[in-house]
Image (cartoon, rainbow, N blue to C red):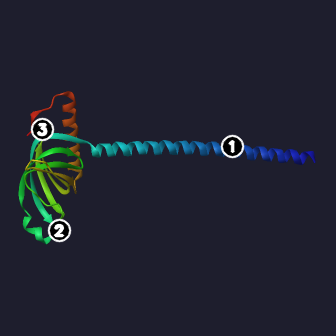
Amino acid sequence: MFYLTLVELIIVLVLLFCLLKYKKEACLHKKNFMFIRTNFEKFKSELNSQKNFQVIVENAECEVRIIDCEDDLFKKLCNKKFRGRIEFLSIKGLTLNSDYNLPIKPNFLLKVYFILGEQEFSIKAKILKKYEHFNQTSLSYDLEFIQLSLKEEKQLVQLLNKIDLERRKGKANDRYYV
């Protein structure tokens, strides 16, 4: 009789030991998962802040060409070119200041040409917003880049970082102020 209880006690202890070991491993897996999740969230926020990073670009001239329009009434504007100045530049798009009054209701597909830091860019964009300035003839447009190639994106990120670094050092170079 005593022999059976001792065997039962050993079985219970072995089961208890296995249970504690399993809980400890599960806890380690949970900590690893939380570490991975935290690092992923940090990476994601850094990536978003990098994509939202913008630089003021003073007097940078650009040329905009209307490539396409959804509305047939405005098809006659296709291949129309106008000039403007870039105010802000980011990896996602730019803010354009121009005297040309372009309607934003039909979706226009634009091609923006500009040179910054000895690099030429030719990027497709669409209009997100239009701003009219009080007592001024010029208008501002927020343009979003579309179909940006990896090469163009890399060049743009390098240029934005270079401009920002030179500004922080107080060595802003005239080549960024075309």
Q: Residue 51 in the image: x percent, y percent?
A: 28, 46
Q: Earlier in the sequence, mark 3 or mark 1?
A: 1
**SS class, disc 3:** helix
Question: For residue 70, which numbered disc appears in the image?
Answer: 2
Pick out the residue farthest to the bottom.
72
Q: Earlier in the sequence, mark 3 or mark 2?
A: 2
**Closer to the camera in the image, 11 or 16:** 16
**Closer to the camera in the image, 100 or 5:** 100
Q: Amino acid at mark 2?
A: Glu
Whole-number angstrom distance, CA of label 3 to CA of label 2: 35 Å
**SS class, disc 1:** helix
Q: Pointer 1: what residue?
A: 20
Q: Earlier in the sequence, mark 1 or mark 2?
A: 1
Q: Pointer 3: what residue?
A: 176
Q: Amino acid at mark 1?
A: Leu
How crowded is the residue under tag 1: few (<14 C-alpha within 10 Å), some, or many (20+)? few
> Which is more foreground, mark 3 or mark 1?
3
Q: Which residue sits at x=18%, y=44%?
A: 88
Whole-number angstrom distance, CA of label 1 to CA of label 2: 66 Å
**CB atoms at circles 3 and 1 under 8 Å apart?**
no
Q: Which residue sits at x=67%, y=43%?
A: 21
